Amino acid sequence: MKRTLLISAVSIFFVLALFSADVPWDSKQLNATWRAGVAKMVITPEQSMWMAGYAARVHQSEGTLHDLWAKVLAIEDSDGKQAILITTDLLGFPKALSDQIRDQLEYEFKLSRARIILHSTHTHSGPVLKDALYDIYPLDHQQLRAIEQYSGKLADQIVALAGEALRSMEPVQIYAQNGVTRFQVNRRNNDASTLNSLTELKGPNDHAVPVIKVVDKQGRLLAVAFGYACHPTVLDGYEWSGDYPGFTQIELEKSHPGTTALFFQGAGADQNPLPRLTVGLARQYGKELAAAVERVLEEDMRELSPQLSASYSEIELPLNPPPSKDELLEIAQDSSAYANYQRSWAKNMIEKMKKNETFISSYPYPLQVWQMGDQMIVSMGGEVVVNYAIRLKQIFGQ
């Protein structure tokens, strides 16, 4: 039988969601039930801070276009196994902060890392977090202190939200299906400056909009989790915002009062929303994605049996040898060939060498899989290009 694959991406952590009609169904499973709970909180910084994502910014934030949010969807299967999906309007979690949050969640709620998806939408209009590529930004001590304080508070807020979602769980039904929208453009193979004159865009792309619907016993939409593989880089200004995913969530929650809408990023590292760079376009793409989700919600969706399994692994990926001291000195001193952040990085590397610090030779790359009924969700750390999504579809079926 034909299998339908849903792709999206997570923390960023790439999230691949897939249906498999080849998985045998047990009709008795649908007589059991899921339980689910949601919680959300505004995480917009209360003060001006340096914004994450663009090296070209020259000063801190100036105001708010719309609030940034942290949201949690907690689920429990018919055997009492629990898991939580955490989404945040942030660029991404540095490893140390991600480890801290997941360690706290395991301590507080006995949830292993396999049962925690910690995700960022990858908006480029959120705050810099602790230890997140500091060389990109000209940070002084006061700005560093603000970043560290915000990050510490954020970790506590996420743990508290997870507890709220777990405590609020109620019987639900969960459904999944794939939609489609097409404002993503492969940024490696298309020139944004000539986009309006192009008659054909070059791929690869993945236009899927995976949707997970959570409905309570009264038939009310408790939560909708959805994704799209496209950089949230419509905006490059100085106002806090969730970019187009933020506008989509606002639109869906406005259309469905009482519903929590959660966006998860797809394999969109090489996919841009084009054209871009205006608030009007961010709002337009947000509405386009919301319309794609609404269409899926209105049509038949596949009900997922209340069985949950989860696994997590870290794969040691070898790194290239670091540059030599002479190579770093060349980078640090050549302002004509290298950007400020590259020279800052080189200077910091040289200082580490002077202190005889060792550099890591591999990176523990996280890979995570959930199985919800016949729906698989694959999460991969970092910015994942669309080819991974395409390859996974080739392996598991289209």
Image (cartoon, rainbow, N blue to C red):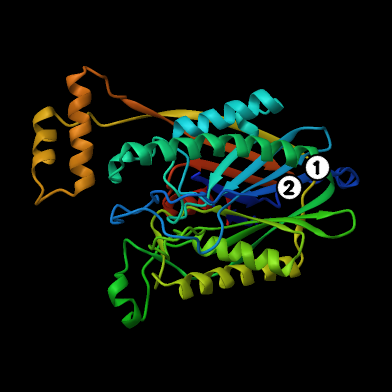
Is residue 44 toward the left or the right of residue 22 in the image?
left
Specify whether residue 112 is in view: no
Of residues 344 and 268, the one drawn nearer to the viewer in this rendering: 344
Which numbered disc flags the more N-terminal residue, 1 or 2? 2
| Quarter of the rendering occupied by the C terminus | bottom right
Q: In the picture shown, does residue 298 fall above or below 311?
A: below
Amino acid type, residue under disc 2 in the picture: Val
Q: In the picture shown, does residue 29 fall above or below 319?
A: below
Would you identify the image quadrant in which residue 361 lies?
top left
Structural crowding at the residue carrying mark 2, measured as other residues with C-alpha within 10 Å and reported as few (<14), some (14–19) or many (≥20): many
Q: Are marks 1 and 2 in contact (CB under 8 Å)?
A: yes
Of residues 163 and 222, the one drawn nearer to the viewer in this rendering: 163
Residue 106: x and y in percent read 64, 26
Residue 326: x and y in percent read 8, 31
Secondary structure beneath dot 1 equals loop
Q: Mark 1 highlights which residue?
A: 168
Would you identify the image quadrant in which residue 209 lies?
bottom right
CA distance for labels 1 and 2 = 7 Å
Residue 85: x and y in percent read 64, 43
Is residue 136 toward the left or the right of residue 337 in the image?
right
Q: Mark 2 highlights which residue?
A: 38
Amino acid type, residue under disc 1 in the picture: Ser
Secondary structure beneath dot 2 equals strand
Residue 327: x and y in percent read 11, 34
